[in-house]
Image (tube, rainbow, N blue to C red):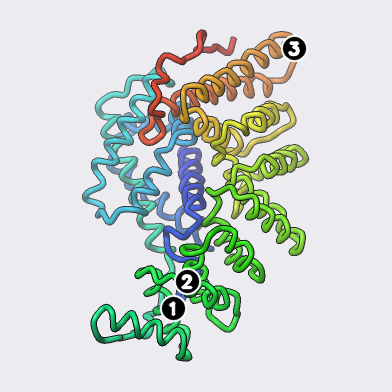
Amino acid sequence: MEEKVMGILLSGIYAAYQDTGRDKVCRIFIPGDSRMFDKFWKVTNRHIKAGWEVLKQNQRQENRMFLEEMWFHRYLQYQTSVSDAYHYVLESKEEEAKDGPLSEELAERTRGYAADCGARKLQTGEIFAMKAFYRMVIQTVRLTITEITPRPEKLQKVDLQGTDEEIRARVIYNLENEKLDNDEMWWHIRYCIDHEIRDYTDLMSRVAKHKCWKAWVRQAAAEYNCRFMEIGEVCERLLSGLSGKLFYWIIAQFTDTKDERLKECLREYAEYYTGQEMLKDISLVKMQDRGGVGKIRRYLERMKHVPERMEDPDSVLALGGIREVELLEELDRLLDLMMRENFRDRTCNGLQAALVSALSNIAVRGRQEYVRVMELLDGKVAYYQEYTHQNPGKPETVKKKLAALIYLREDVCWRSRHFPGMISAIDISSQEPEGGTYCLG
């Protein structure tokens, strides 16, 4: 069971890491970027194993028994403790000694889940060991991020003297008249962004597109344009002529807009550059586009399995970001795909985890959305229970899939109603459908 928990942790940290688009760890292109991201799996796995050994030495075996139980494995995969630990480290400057409040909060959530979904009351020693477990997870994330974050070279200092008005005037003069090197141009662009000097979108478009500049300078110029251009201008004046990581980085800055012009740019790009279909579809899914979701679903239907190793980017993880009620029909089809006898999900963070996330995202949006999600899941459970009852000779796989579906419903319900930041302002406590508890018999 050690391998099971470590596998869930590894995949969960990786899923959270991908979800940031990397730009919260550091800029994609920075001076002296040593591309340490390629070592993510190896580094994270090493720190998990080291932390696990310390946990075993310091906590009694009887207090670590929860680590071997199925409800706990479900909790780690389908709720948000691992990603919460990741984002806590990413967004805070706290030292290890100050991790206590979060580890206590995560342990308290887990205790509630054990009582509600595991029919299990945790003992005092187990809760103490659980806090130690979560401290280990937080520390693993901290050590991993520290080790894989590229360390930039020191930029050449640009030292402009004078009042704020004089420095501003000098920056504008330099941009319009001086020939700047890479370090100087980067500094000038950052100054313009930080001081909201908005008049140089044409210049920044040229810098972003021209490969004479270093990649980190081009990204700074693209960031300037993303900050001060309208989406239509970005599509017309910036994205044309760009390719590769910088193109997709710009797309990612505007996915929340769900703009049709941006989608069209993606489609045209994928037609021109071969091998870009999956990247395009993942970007479309993040824009809540039905066509992108449908393409990934049909891809999984053809494959009849989820790739065991998580990919970069990962199409199944992208499905977990669905949050629009209009996409429930596609999620309905994905549920049926998960239930097929010949479909194989991956061990950790596969389609089931993505569906828990997506359905929870929709359920917390309001009373009606919650009811629609639960009606969908209740209908699925009832249908497959009847199917199993009428086909008793089916292999054990069918029963396991029914159990997985019932657990999925339970996890969506629990996640929708208990997690900070996910609970709708609308009271849904009275919206639990009748007959909310199912049995496998």
Q: Earlier in the sequence, mark 1 or mark 2?
A: 1
Q: Marks 1 and 3: which is nearer the front?
A: 1
* Residue at which label 3 appears: 391
Residue at the location (36% across, 57% down)? 143
Q: Do residues under tags 1 and 3 come within 8 Å of each other at their CB atoms?
A: no
Q: Marks 3 and 2: which is nearer the front?
A: 2
Judged from the image, the secondary structure of the residue bearing numbered disc 3 is loop
Residue 22 position, x and y percent, is 48, 58
Packing grade of label 1 (10 A; few <14, some 14-19, many >=20) is many
Can residue 340 be spotted in the picture?
Answer: yes
Q: How many marks?
A: 3
Tell me the kind of residue under disc 1: Trp
* Residue at which label 2 appears: 220
**Residue 186: image tag:** 1
Residue 425 position, x and y percent, is 38, 28
Residue 282 placement, left or right of 77? right
Judged from the image, the secondary structure of the residue bearing numbered disc 1 is helix
Tell me the kind of residue under disc 2: Ala
Judged from the image, the secondary structure of the residue bearing numbered disc 2 is helix
